[in-house]
Image (spheres, rainbow, N blue to C red):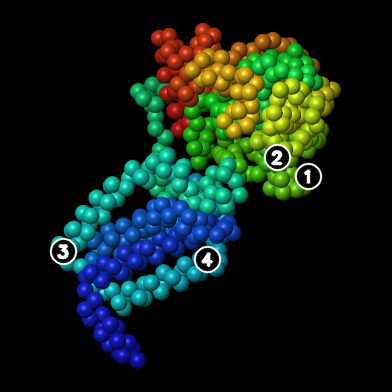
């Protein structure tokens, strides 16, 4: 039987020749590419292939690399079978890594992860690999493909064809580099975008592009580029001039920071017919606080930019794929219990993984906490504050340990309904407003009023507490108000970024730093006054200054620039001498360069 099988294979093989070997090899690479696409969605129950048929460029960009790889391995090995096995090992090896990483951490495999071998090893030891139907099918396909090639594609290609094949493969690969690295192509051509649960999920955006394509695209972000003129020795020398200072035990107070989703004080923008009750309590808090303007990097979206600028002290943010320096780590190092809440989903901006790298000991999301309160939806502010306050009170009743919490609300998230009034219709007068604008504004301002009512209950409890605590409140960005910012324009609010007024209106929210009586006594400060216009990355400097704390070396090193150039905007604009400018004084320019160098060093040299 064995002899007959070999004889049959030999007869079938006669005349196949090297060209048929090449064809079989390219087809085997195509097959490996299709298997990679099958596994690209990991454990998600999403139908992948219909979406890629609708976006054929995505399909092509996922299939080309394994095809080219199989051709290159054929040029090296001269035979189909080893080429197939090597291509499968590389392509499906990384694809399986992505598959298991999605299953275990809801986090895709990026090229940058290959640079974190220690972290990868630590992660691998915590989980148990498994086999499911997709993986078994993939394994059977690989085995079947190997058997077919063993019997039907055994010819070797000649010396000249292999050189030509290698040259063509490498030339085509080089020509495709700009395509795979292009952000514009990546952002436009997304497969089954309408099928993924949320476009805000970094994980689901990734798998919407397949695996091979987004993995190769992620090479462009694998290594953070230093600022122009960066010298590591100089940045290290700036930081080494300072020493981390401990918070004196007698001055340790609890710190609660809450970033309010899309929160801004529109009474400062002259909205006609705005009910004074909307911001009445916020204005009362401002009279009891240090308050001022926060000039953010973002508008109507990108929440995590303001969030992570605040906790890291960096105006430009990294990927946070590994443990990363932050003020959260500093408080943790000082003996604080460090926690946070976001009453939304943990995959939102990949907070579940990144917040661990930023140092939080516990972070509560819908999946691990708020599900019991609000079910499978984000929680309202009433539900968030109603959960947070009892949790904090229980902690301080049972612990002497100082407490740090930085939370992010969700309720104010747009878009706001244009058809129904969810919060009543008494928050802004109709006047000449269209139904569209009237409904958007009432829903936004009604939500803001509800947020302030919940803040009233929180601060009432903190006022009565003997436990010293400071409260930091700020908005992450301005809200979405109609497509194309139509409501802003209809209200006559200037958003022209070519003017200082428009720039400020576009990017500015409000902040305040409030303290209860116990904290005022401990810290020797009444926490009342007008604060400077400042970027979120320097807000913690203001907090430490108000508390009389010296703080970590990185914060100390930033103090001079925080005073001289308190806004270092990602658009290349700055705030110096009270004016928005893109042309700094020589002193300001030197300070900004030092700051950019220092924050890059800080982001790339973990200290805790």
- Label 1 with label 2: CB-CB less than 8 Å: yes
Per the image, the residue denoted by label 4 is 134
Q: CA distance from mark 1 to mark 3?
A: 69 Å
Q: Is residue 599 left or right of residue 232?
A: right
Comparing 594 with 203, the one in front is 203
Q: CA distance from mark 4 to mark 2?
A: 33 Å
Question: Circle 2 — which element?
Answer: loop
- Label 1 with label 3: CB-CB less than 8 Å: no
Per the image, the residue denoted by label 1 is 373
Q: Is residue 247 visible?
A: no
- Label 3 with label 2: CB-CB less than 8 Å: no
Comparing 362 with 23, the one in front is 23
Q: Quadrant of residue 130?
A: bottom right
- Give the mark, 1 or 3, whose residue is nearer the N terminus: 3
At a point 54% along the width and 49% down the height, the residue shown is 193
Q: Is residue 600 left or right of residue 132?
A: left
At a point 21% along the width and 74% down the height, the residue shown is 17
Residue 517 screen position, x and y as percent: 79, 16
At a point 23% along the width and 69% down the height, the residue shown is 19
Residue 599 screen position, x and y as percent: 47, 26
Per the image, the residue denoted by label 2 is 343
Question: Circle 3 — which element?
Answer: helix
Residue 324 screen position, x and y as percent: 52, 35
């Amino acid at each position: 039987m064995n002899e007959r099988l070999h004889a049959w294979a030999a007869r079938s093989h006669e005349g196949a020749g090297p060209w048929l070997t090449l064809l079989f090899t390219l087809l085997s690479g195509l097959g490996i590419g299709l298997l990679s696409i099958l596994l690209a969605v990991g454990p998600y129950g999403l139908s992948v292939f219909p979406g890629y048929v609708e976006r054929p460029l995505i399909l092509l960009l996922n299939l080309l690399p394994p095809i080219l790889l199989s051709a290159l391995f054929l040029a090296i090995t001269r035979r189909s079978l080893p080429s197939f096995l090597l291509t499968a090992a590389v392509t499906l090896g990384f694809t399986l890594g992505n598959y298991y990483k999605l299953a275990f951490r809801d986090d895709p495999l990026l090229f940058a992860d290959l640079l974190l071998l220690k972290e990868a090893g630590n992660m691998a030891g915590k989980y148990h690999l498994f086999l499911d139907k997709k993986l078994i099918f993939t394994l059977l396909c690989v085995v079947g493909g190997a058997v077919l090639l063993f019997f039907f594609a055994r010819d070797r290609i000649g010396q000249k064809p292999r050189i030509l094949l290698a040259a063509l493969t490498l030339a085509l690969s080089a020509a495709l580099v700009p395509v795979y690295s292009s952000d514009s192509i990546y952002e436009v051509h997304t497969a089954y975008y309408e099928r993924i649960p949320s476009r805000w999920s970094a994980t689901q955006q990734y798998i919407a592009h397949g695996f091979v394509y987004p993995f190769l695209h992620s090479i462009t972000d694998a290594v953070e580029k230093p600022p122009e003129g960066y010298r590591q020795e100089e940045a290290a020398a700036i930081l080494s001039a300072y020493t981390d200072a401990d918070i004196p035990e007698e001055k340790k107070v609890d710190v609660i920071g809450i970033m309010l989703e899309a929160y801004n004080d529109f009474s400062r923008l002259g909205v006609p017919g705005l009910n004074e009750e909307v911001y009445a309590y916020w204005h009362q808090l401002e009279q009891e606080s240090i308050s001022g303007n926060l000039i953010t990097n973002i508008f109507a979206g990108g929440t995590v930019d303001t969030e992570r600028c605040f906790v890291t002290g960096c105006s430009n943010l990294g990927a946070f794929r590994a443990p990363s320096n932050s003020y959260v780590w500093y408080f943790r190092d000082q003996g604080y219990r460090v926690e946070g809440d976001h009453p939304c989903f943990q995959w939102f901006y990949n907070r579940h993984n990144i917040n661990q790298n930023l140092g939080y000991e516990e972070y509560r999301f819908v999946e691990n906490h708020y599900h019991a309160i609000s079910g499978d939806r984000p929680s309202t502010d009433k539900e968030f504050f109603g959960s947070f306050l009892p949790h904090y009170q229980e902690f301080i009743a049972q612990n002497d340990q100082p407490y740090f919490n930085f939370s992010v609300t969700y309720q104010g998230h747009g878009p706001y309904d244009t058809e129904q009034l969810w919060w009543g219709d008494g928050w802004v007068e109709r006047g000449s407003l269209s139904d569209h604008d009237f409904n958007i504004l009432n829903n936004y301002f009604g939500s803001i009023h509800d947020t302030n009512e919940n803040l009233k209950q929180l601060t009432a409890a903190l006022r009565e507490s003997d436990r010293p605590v400071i409260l930091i409140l700020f908005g992450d960005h301005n809200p979405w108000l109609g497509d194309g910012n139509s409501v802003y324009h209809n209200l006559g609010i200037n958003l022209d970024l070519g003017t200082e007024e428009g720039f400020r209106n576009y990017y500015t929210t409000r902040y305040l730093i409030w303290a209860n009586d116990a904290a005022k006594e401990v810290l020797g400060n009444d926490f009342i006054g007008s604060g400077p216009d400042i970027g979120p990355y320097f807000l913690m400097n203001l907090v430490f200054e108000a508390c009389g704390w010296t703080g970590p070396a990185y914060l100390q090193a930033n103090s001079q620039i925080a005073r001289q150039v308190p806004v270092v905007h990602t658009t290349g604009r700055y705030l110096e001498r009270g004016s928005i400018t893109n042309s700094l004084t020589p002193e300001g320019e030197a300070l900004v360069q030092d700051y950019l160098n220092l924050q890059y060093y800080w982001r790339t040299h973990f200290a805790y």
